[in-house]
Image (cartoon, grey):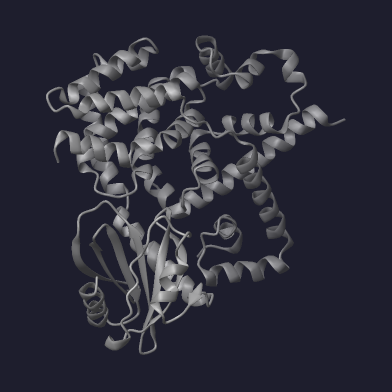
Amino acid sequence: MTASEKARRFQAIVLPHIDSAFNLARWLARSEQDAEDIVQEAYLRAFKFFDGFHGDDGRPWLLTIVRNTFYTWYQQNRAQKEDTEFDEQVHSGETEVSGVTQRLDNDPEALLIQKDARRQLERGLKALSPEFREVLVMRELEELSYKEIAGIVGIPIGTVMSRLARGRKQLAESLVSTSRVHDGP
Amino acid sequence: MMDHKQLLPAYLDQELGIAAAIAIEHHLNGCSECQAEYAEQRAVSARLKKDATYFKAPASLARRLQRSLRRDRSPSVGFKALNFDWLRAGAGSKAWNVNWLGAGTVAAFALALVWGASLYLALPSAQERLTEELISSHVRSLQVEHLSDVASSDRHTVKPWFNGKLDFAPPVVDLASQDFPLEGGRLDYVNGRTVAVLIYRHRRHPINLYVWPTSDRDAAPQAQDRQGYHLVRWTLGGMKYWAVSDLATNELEVFAGALRSQM
C-alpha cells in the first residue's frame, strides 16, 4: 500500500467514525478537552497501525483504540480520579466548552433545582464506574452488537450482557434516589 | 446454564436467537419478578437512548484530523508531518498529552505495539462477522416466511422493483435454464447498509444472493461452510456477491459459476 493509498483508505474507513470516537471518549473522560486529546491520540495510533487492519468496518477497530487510549490516560490520572466531583471541577476550570452540565456542578443554586430528567440521567451515567459506563454508551448510543462490544472491551459476550444489566440497574437506582432527594417529601 | 433472569438484557436488546427469545417470552408471562426486572431494564434503556447526549466531535477537531491526513498524502512529507501536526495541536492542552507525545514517545510506541497486537487478536475479523450476519439473515428470511418483497420469476419485473429503493442497480440474471429459477427479490440490511437480495431456488432449496456495491477489486469465488450452511462470495465489477444456502457447496459453486458467466 502506498502512502497516498493508505491515507485514502484511512480517510474512507476510519475517519468517518470520528463522532463515535468522540462520543465514547467524551463519556469516558467526562471532559470535552480530555476527549479531544484522547481522540487525537487514538487517531494517531490508528493511522500508525492501519496497515495491520484488514476489515471493512473501521468503527469497532477505532473504538478499541479510543478505549485503550482512554484507559492509559485514566491510569496516569488515577490519583486525581478518586473523587468524581473533584475531577469534573478540575476540567471545567480549564475549559470554556463544556457548557451547562459542568457549570451546574459548581452552582449550588442550580443543584437545588435540578429536576431536569436529562441532567439527572446524565449525572447518573457519569457517576457509574467506567466498566459499566462504556458498555452502556456502546450499546445505547452507538448501538453496537454484544459481539462488537465484546471484541472492543476484550470480554466474553456473557460479561457484556451482565455488565449491561448491572449498569442499567445501578443507573435506575441512582435515578430513583435522586428523584427522592429532590422531589420527595 | 444461564437462567431466564440473566438472559433478560439479551432479550431486551434482541440479541437472542428465535428459540431462546420465545422461551423468555413464555417465562415472562408467568414470572412477576422477571417482569419487574425487564420493565426496569427497558425503562432505563429507553431513557438512555432518548435523553443521554450523543456528543458529536467538534468541527475543529475533525478539521484538524483531516488536515493532518491530507498533508500526509504527499509521499515526500510522509508520516512525520502527521505526527508533528498532532504534537503541536496537543501541546497546549494537557500535561499528560505533552508527556505522551514528547518524552514518552518511545514508551508510547512500545505500548502501542502491544495494543496493536492484542487488538488484532481480540477482534473477530470483519469477514467473520459478516459471515455470521449473512447466515442469520438467511435463516431469518426462511423463518418469518419473508423471502421475497417482490415475487416474480421475471427479471424484468424484479430488476425495476429495486429502482429508487437502492443507490445502486443490482444485476438481475435468470438461470431457469440451468435449473436455478429466479423467485424474486427483497431488501435487507446487512453490514451496516441496505443491500439487494435475489432469491433463487434449486430443487427445493432457496438461495439468497446478497448484492451490494464495493470499491474492492474483483475477486474469484470463495466457498465456506458454517453452521450447516454454505456460502460462496465473490467480487465482480464493483459489486460484492454473497450466495447463502443449504445447498451442497459444489452445487452452490455451480450456481455462482452460472451467474458469473452471464454477468
Task: Count the marks.
Answer: 0
Residue depicted at x 14% and y 37%: A2
Location of residue A138 in the rendering, given as x and y in whole percent from the top left corner:
49, 42
Quadrant holding the C terminus of chain B: bottom left
Location of residue A86 in the rendering, given as x and y in whole percent from the top left corner:
56, 16
Quadrant in which residue B241 is drawn = bottom left
- Quick check: can you spot residue A79? yes
Quadrant in which residue B136 is drawn = bottom left
Location of residue A123 in the rendering, given as x and y in whole percent from the top left corner:
63, 29
- Residue B165 falls left or right of residue B35: left
Location of residue B51 in the rendering, given as x and y in whole percent from the top left corner:
64, 37
Closer to the camera, A93 or A81? A93
Residue depicted at x 32% and y 84%: B180
Q: From the viewer's perspective, is residue B31 above or below residue A134?
A: below
Residue depicted at x 57% and y 63%: B3
Residue depicted at x 37% and y 48%: A151
Closer to the camera, B256 or B24? B256
- Residue A57 falls left or right of residue B27: left
- Quick check: can you spot residue A73? no
Quadrant in which residue A13 is drawn = top left
Closer to the camera, B123 or B129? B129
